[in-house]
Amino acid sequence: MPGPLQGYRILDFTRYQQGPFATVQLSDLGAEIWKVEPPGGDPGRGSDLAADGFSRYFEAHDRGKRSIELNLRRPEAVEAALRMAERCDGVIENYRPGVMDRLGIGYQALSERNPRIVMVSASAFGSNGPQIGEPGYDVIGQATGGVMSLQALGDDAEPRTLPGGFADQIGAMQACIAMLAGLIAAKDTGRGQHVDVSLLGSQIALQSVYLTGYLKDGQQPHMRRRRMPTFTFYRAADGLWLVIGVVDAKNWRALCQLLEHPEWEQDERFASALARLNHSAELEALLEDCFASADRDEWLRRLRAADIPSAPVNSYADVEASEQVWANDYLTEIADPRYGTRRVTGLPWTFSRTPGAVQGRAPELNADADSILTEVGYSVDDIAQLRSSGATPE
């Protein structure tokens, strides 16, 4: 199904997660992705392997792409990459800063062959500063960006991480945004540019509310077990969990009425949002007792009837069974010649005219080498010579 980026082509030199998820999003939006893999393939191919050889890690980050394996230590492979860049609108890479230049495919070399090319480098620490060349993975981004300290439950508490891959995923989204902006600028000006996004910068942007407060008052924020008594989770009588999102006076009044405690609205401990926060433990105990008196579905029925923001705390099984999820194609199905029809994550956007779609399963290593090389002008004999030189495997 055509997407808003139909007709655009992106050359992908990324590995693992931060870069590959960026190009997955571009693929879902309709761009054609040429994934250049090193000898042996993207190391992500070997991550989280199931007994049948299925890698949830690689499938999630590399679906819908075309694969070509190039040994970029061979000059013939470098030339092939440059010729590919001539036919592409953008390039994304997540090597350490300087590696692409040393390989002969940095921004200067690429732009000499294609002045309109937009190159996005997804680094760990950015393009300047004393840590520019240091390695970095998801856990490094979470640590250096401050999110681990934010997740701690107090100044003396141990740091806590977000689930594995969150820094990479946020960094990937920033890389995708950068590419989209670069493509627009190139279309308007006729000139490409080099953009750097980093794990560190992405984590800082993610925490803009908390950092804005810290930069104003110097107070390190921390997470609580519950953010606030009326904006959190509670357990119902059947052991299932629900959340409420009560932030304004109208909803607080409705909740007090629903729980048959209208006196709470006038109680000085709970009369305002600040008062409720300052008396969190008292109010949480009262609300825990209330919600423990009926099953979750009954509470959700009552809460929704009163127009009080609420929801079940869903497991993945609940997400998969959700009519709302399928109505918006947030989950979808694809045909997989190896594993049969599979359910996969869909697109988080809904376009009225150019909807986009999951373009298919992740490619087999080097599966598209001949077709890609042919598209950039290599003859059958040329491809045979590339193989004999060791630039690409048989």
Image: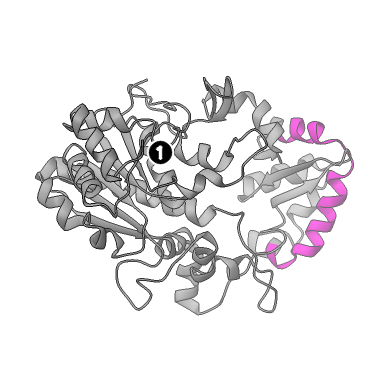
Residue 289 within the magenta-colored segment of the rendering: yes
* Residue name at image x 29 percent, y 55 percent: 73
Q: Is residue 389 left or right of residue 187?
A: right
Q: Position of residue 353 (x, y in %)?
A: 33, 21
Instruction: Classify the position of the N terminus by image quarter.
Output: top left
Decide if residue 53 is in sight here. yes
Whole-percent x and y of residue 226? 71, 58
Q: Quadrant of the C terminus?
A: top left
Judge from the rendering whether residue 149 lies leftward or rightward of residue 74; answer left or right.
right
How far from the left and from the top, in percent, is residue 228? 68, 58
Q: Residues within 10 Å of mark 1 (few under 14, many from 20)?
A: many
* Residue highlighted by disc 1: 25
Q: Identify the image quadrant of residue 309.
A: top right
Residue 7 in the image: above or below residue 160: above
Query: Hey, which quadrant is residue 200 in on the image?
Result: bottom left
Q: Nearer the viewer, residue 22 or 150?
A: 22
Q: Nearer the viewer, residue 339 or 282?
A: 339
Residue at 35% over, 78% down: 130
Answer above or below: position of 129 versus 89.
below
Answer yes or no: is residue 115 visible: no
Identity of the residue furthest to the front in this view: 388
Taking the spot 77% from the left edge, 59% from the top edge, the residue there is: 267
Q: What is the magenta range?
A: 277-303
Q: Is residue 271 above or below residue 46?
A: below
- Give the amino acid type for the residue marked by disc 1 in the picture: Gln
Q: Is residue 47 magenta?
A: no
Q: Position of residue 101 (x, y in %)?
A: 23, 61
Residue 185 lies left or right of residue 213; in this view the side is left
Label 1 sits on a secondary structure element that is helix
